[in-house]
Amino acid sequence: MRIEIKKLAKSYRRKKVLRDLSWQLEKGKSYVVTGPNGSGKSTLLRLLSGLEKMTAGEIVFYTGEMTADPITMRGSIGLVSPDIQFYGQLSPLENLTFFAALRGLNRSRDSLENLLTGVQLAEDRHRPVGAFSSGMKQRLRLAFALLHEPGFLFLDEPFTNLDRAGKELVNQIIANQVSRGIVLIATNEPSEVERFGQDILQLAPRSMGPG
C-alpha cells in the first residue's frame, strides 16, 4: 500500500498554490505536511481525498497490484477537516446513521454506538449536534472519518479545539491507523510535527514543493 504524488500542481485562477510537488507515502508510517497558512496543506489533503481536481500532475494509490486515482479510492479514505459539517438538528448517532446509509455501508446501530464510545461521545449520542461545543464536533469528525474503516487517513489540524483527553484520543487513533495503513497529518504545531513526522513535507507560501 502506497501513494505516489508526481509533479502535482494546483492553481486557483492565477494563484499557484501547489507546484511541481512529488512525494511518496507508504504503509506503516505517519506523515506530516507543514507550512504557513496559505501554503497549500489543506488543498493537498483535499486533492488526495478526491474532493478537488488537480491542475497538473498525478496522484496514484497502490493497493496490492491495483492502482487507482483519488476519486476511485474515496471509499477507502477517511478525512478529518474543518470543512466537514453535520446536521445540527440531528444527534451524532442520527448523523452517522444517515452518512452510513448514504455511503451504502451496512453498519448496525451497535457498531455506530461503539464508534461514538470510541471518540468519547457515548453520553451525548442522542443530543442535537447543534448544541455541541467545537471540541465535541471535532470528536464527531473523527468518528465520521473512521465510519468506513479506511486504509488511508488524512487529518487536517486534528487537534484543533480538543482538550487533553481529546488529544490523547487522536494520538491513539493515529497509532492504530499507522499499523494498518497510511496516515497524513497537516499541522503547524512543532510538537505534533516532531511526534508524528516520520517523514515531513515542508510547504512554503505558494508552494515550490518539498523543502
Image (cartoon, rainbow, N blue to C red):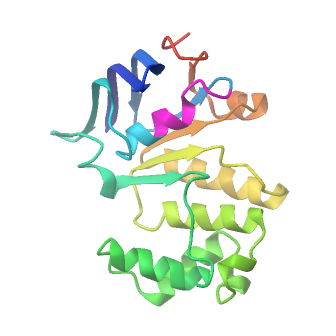
Quarter of the image with the N terminus in it: top left
Q: Residue at x 74, y 49 (%)?
A: 160
- Give the camera-side residue of 41 and 139: 41
> Measured along the vertical axis of the image, is residue 178 above or below residue 25?
below
All told, the count of numbered labels is: 0
Q: Position of residue 185 (x, y in %)?
A: 58, 38
Q: Which quadrant of the figure has residue 2? A: top left
Looking at the image, residue 166 sits to the left or right of residue 5; the answer is right
Looking at the image, residue 84 sits to the left or right of residue 171; the answer is left
* Magenta-colored stretch includes residue 42: yes
Q: Residue furthest right?
A: 164
Q: Is residue 29 visible?
A: no
- Give the camera-side residue of 6 and 130: 130
Q: Residue at x 27, y 26 (%)?
A: 58
Q: Position of residue 159 (x, y in %)?
A: 72, 49
Quarter of the image with the C terminus in it: top right
Q: Position of residue 72 (x, y in %)?
A: 23, 49
> Measured along the vertical axis of the image, is residue 52 above or below residue 94?
above
Q: Position of residue 15 (x, y in %)?
A: 48, 21
Q: Is residue 148 visible?
A: yes
Looking at the image, residue 68 sits to the left or right of residue 50; the answer is left
* Magenta-colored stretch includes residue 7: no
Q: Residue at x 56, y 83 (%)?
A: 93
- Write the start and end of the magenta stretch as one range: 37-45
Q: Which quadrant of the figure has residue 132? A: bottom right
